[in-house]
Image (cartoon, grey):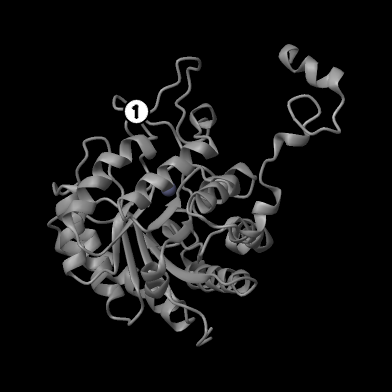
Amino acid sequence: MGDGERRGLLARLEAGSVICAEGYLFELERRGYLQAGAFVPEVVLEAPEAVKELHREFLNAGSDVIEAFTYYAHREKLRLIGREGDLERINRQAIRLAQEVAAEGDALVAGNICNTNAYLPGDRESAKAVRAMFEEQIGWAAEAGVDMLIAETISFLGEAEIAIDVMRQTSLPTVVTFAIHKNGLLRDGATPARAARRIAELGADVVGLNCIRGPETMMVHLRAVRRAVSGYVAALPVPYRTTRREPTFESLTDPQRPEAPFPVALDPFTCSRYEIADFARQALDMDVRYLGVCCGAGPHHIRAMAEALGRRPPASRYSPDMSKHYALGDDAALRQAYRDYAVDL
Ligand SMILES: [Zn+2]
């Protein structure tokens, strides 16, 4: 790190938009490297090349930020799976993997903290434990020289207040995003708009929403957040077709199957790349400049988002071009008999 030429997060936001690909847990689960349920990123230690490959695919698809894969690599989770002794090693290694891949392009490396699942509103002991968990993770990230910090998927305003306080003890740019569950409020009662305003007042450079809701059901809360704050706003939905009746990906039901779709059978609800591109354009029209896709994201979603924002990432070399399709294309070199057959496909 320490490359004086490379623009930081705030300069990039000032100049336009920033894309941050998320959703490593879901993608590495699908690839066979991570267990659904506890969702702990042991893959960072067990198969680091798999993590680097995914980082590389998102970089190639247009992500400006490589998040160190420390989501759920916190003390509470590692205790849950009996690997508390590996806490520091997994955090340091995740940051190193992100830095190695970011250096292959022009990406920023983000240190990452998230919902602890240990926070209890009004409980002084839990607040102390949460603060200690954030301090150790942010400490390792800052020491390793990351470019920025992200606190994500937080659903208590009180927990976000601790997160921003710890992050502000460094001089790094900060992003805080809230996870909004079915009832549309933070779990300690604040509206997303009030929570965003409060965290912006506490000094977060970017505030917004991530995970849990698809583009359709995130938008109403995103508008409220945008109205509530004057600074940079973030939106990173899950790429699933959530609805007014089933507004979160945990609440989706599949009329054709008895199993709950969440978390490993969400496939039939997946948004197409066109829907993600539409969301990116709508968000940018509202001056929401920090954009990404969370759990369920694939590189094709990120590329579609990048292109919707007017970019041409390396992966755009292979963006669809149907003109040379044997039957559906219109290239003069195609055989007419095959093009005529298109209606019978
Ligand atoms: Zn997510």
In front here: 50 or 282? 282
Based on the displayed image, in which of its 4 quarters is residue 230 positioned? Answer: bottom left
Looking at the image, residue 324 lies above or below residue 226: above
Looking at the image, residue 261 lies above or below residue 134: above
Looking at the image, residue 8 lies above or below residue 232: below
Say whether residue 247 is visible.
yes
Location of the C terminus by quadrant is top right
In percent of the image, x 35 and y 74: which residue is there? Answer: 173
What amino acid type should be assigned to the residue bearing mark 1?
A: Thr
In percent of the image, x 36 and y 42: which residue is there? Answer: 212
* Element class at badge 1: loop
| Whole-percent x, y for residue 324 in the image | 78, 35
| Whole-percent x, y for residue 274 in the image | 51, 37
Residue to which mark 1 is pinned? 243
In the picture, measured across the screen, residue 341 lies left or right of residue 193, that is right
Say whether residue 28 is visible.
no
The reply to whether the residue tagged 1 has its Cβ within 8 angstroms of ligand 1 is no
In percent of the image, x 75 and y 30: which residue is there? Answer: 330
In front here: 28 or 21? 21
Location of the N terminus by quadrant is bottom right
Looking at the image, residue 57 lies above or below residue 175: above
| Whole-percent x, y for residue 309 in the image | 47, 53
| Whole-percent x, y for residue 120 in the image | 20, 54
In percent of the image, x 25 and y 40: which residue is there? Answer: 220
Task: Give the class, few, some or many, for how many residues have Cα within 10 Å of label 1's Cα (few <14, many ≥20).
Answer: some
In the picture, measured across the screen, residue 72 lies left or right of residue 166, that is right
Based on the displayed image, in which of its 4 quarters is residue 241 positioned? Answer: top left
Task: Please give the count of numbered marks on the rendered protein.
Answer: 1
In the picture, measured across the screen, residue 125 lies left or right of residue 99, that is left
